Amino acid sequence: MKIETKYSIGDTVWFLDGYRAQCSKITGIEVQVLGKSKPFVQYRFCVFPPIKEEHAFKTKEELIKYIEK
């Protein structure tokens, strides 16, 4: 099985921490696969708690568009 993530270690992403938009460099990636289900991917940071892949965005503008939905 080959697992591809949206971002790599060292990439900077935008996400929500509480109600604040933050950006930080990814320091680690956790992947969990249970049976034949879709892989669960989380990104880790030095200062912030881990976030799910679907809550990480390349730009602040992409994050804002996601919030506005």
Image (spheres, rainbow, N blue to C red):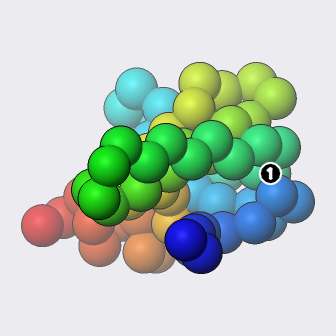
* Type of amino acid under label 1: Lys
Quarter of the image with the N terminus is: bottom right
Q: Nearer the viewer, residue 19 or 32?
A: 32
Quarter of the image with the C terminus is: bottom left
Percent across and percent down for residue 36 are 29, 59
Res 2 quadrant in image: bottom right
Give the crowd class for mark 1: few <14, some 14-19, many >=20 residues within 10 Å: some
Q: Is residue 60 visible?
A: no
Percent across and percent down for residue 62 are 42, 75
Q: Nearer the viewer, residue 54 or 38?
A: 38
Q: Residue at x 57, y 32 (%)?
A: 50
Q: Is residue 33 above or below residue 4?
A: above
Q: Residue at x 27, y 56 (%)?
A: 37
Side of 69 where 26 appears, left or right: right
Q: Is residue 27 visible?
A: yes
Percent across and percent down for residue 55 are 40, 53
- Kindly give the residue lying farthest to the left in the view shown: 69
Side of 56 where 4 appears, left or right: right
Q: Residue at x 32, y 49 (%)?
A: 35
Res 38 quadrant in image: bottom left
